[in-house]
Amino acid sequence: MQGKTTHSSTPAAVVIEPRRPEFDFSNVGKYWLQDPFTSHFMNALSIVVPHSERTVIDIVRKYADQISDPKLAKDMDALIRQEGRHTLMHLRCNEMLKKCGYPAIRLFEKFQKFFVGRLRKISPPAWELAMPAAFEHFTSAISRDFILNKTFWTGGPGDAASNSAVAFTDWHALEELEHQAVCFDVFAALEKRTWLLTPALLFLWMPATLISVYGMQLYFLLQDGILLKRKNWGPYVKFLLQSLPILTRGAFKYVKKDFQPWNEKDVEVYHLHKQRISPITS
Ligand SMILES: [Fe+2]
Ligand SMILES: [Fe+2]
């Protein structure tokens, strides 16, 4: 596959910058967003993230020497450093969550490692390269939604909007948006057939992500007894209907010949968010 390098599509106005903010989650409860549904959705995502980000790092590193565009190589190095820090912070969050007593978290982690490991063993390079691109597809979609629909997640300004887990998510969302194009660019450089990302998402990564995230969320809500109360069924279904489009839309964009991960609106959203959370990141 050597020699098929194309260029970084991250706009010049966006610099992928590894930051090292510190977060203390010791005073954050398990319901750190506006309600148990939003909180446990993000808690479930946090369980899925560390091994997924380690896989992204590992695959990007594996193919790094096949990339000759210096800008893309620099983006890849910055992405690896950002993801390393994200993983560390998510592991910290997840330790807090495990202390709340959810024994199935460890089982899920073992299964995820086994599943992803097996899949990588049998995947040809195109399918292995689709893994980080697919993972970044979801993280950038969730990040964009967290940035744009703050009231849906945190309930608006107030205590819920100002705890350290929200600050952590704000920082992670900024960096996910910032490096959203990198794994796509690596895929485009080495594989070319970017339309392959659509079937990879539709037939593998979308079902796997939906089952993992909503499955873990359901488990948390059942363990807490939230869904044992009939009055909570309506709000739960409402949450599912509101959150599903975040994870299901956009899979077909990769079949468009001229698809680019960034657009003007994204750049604008990114800069506004970067400015808004500068007290956290500086
Ligand atoms: Fe990340
Ligand atoms: Fe990422």
Image (tube, grey):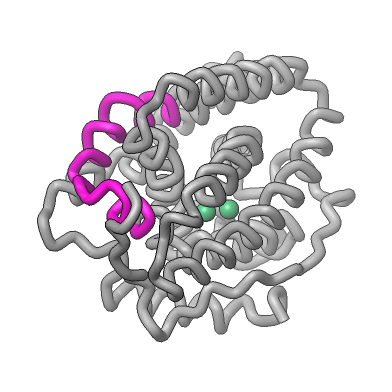
Q: Residue furthest front?
A: 2
What's the magenta region?
185-210
Q: Is residue 243 visible from the viewing direction of this image?
A: no
Residue 78 falls left or right of residue 164:
left
Q: Nearer the viewer, residue 36 or 18?
A: 18
- x and y, in percent, of residue 265 in the image: 30, 75
Q: Main secondary structure of the magenta part?
A: helix
Q: Is residue 207 magenta?
A: yes
Q: Nearer the viewer, residue 203 or 127?
A: 127
Q: How many marks?
A: 0
The residue located at (63%, 35%) in the rendering is 51
The residue located at (62%, 23%) in the rendering is 113
- x and y, in percent, of residue 48 in the image: 59, 34
The residue located at (48%, 68%) in the rendering is 178
Residue 263 falls left or right of residue 115:
left
- Does 207 appear above or below 180? above
* Quadrant (top left/top right/bottom left/bottom right) for the C terminus: bottom right
Q: Quadrant of residue 145?
A: bottom left
- x and y, in percent, of residue 245 in the image: 31, 42
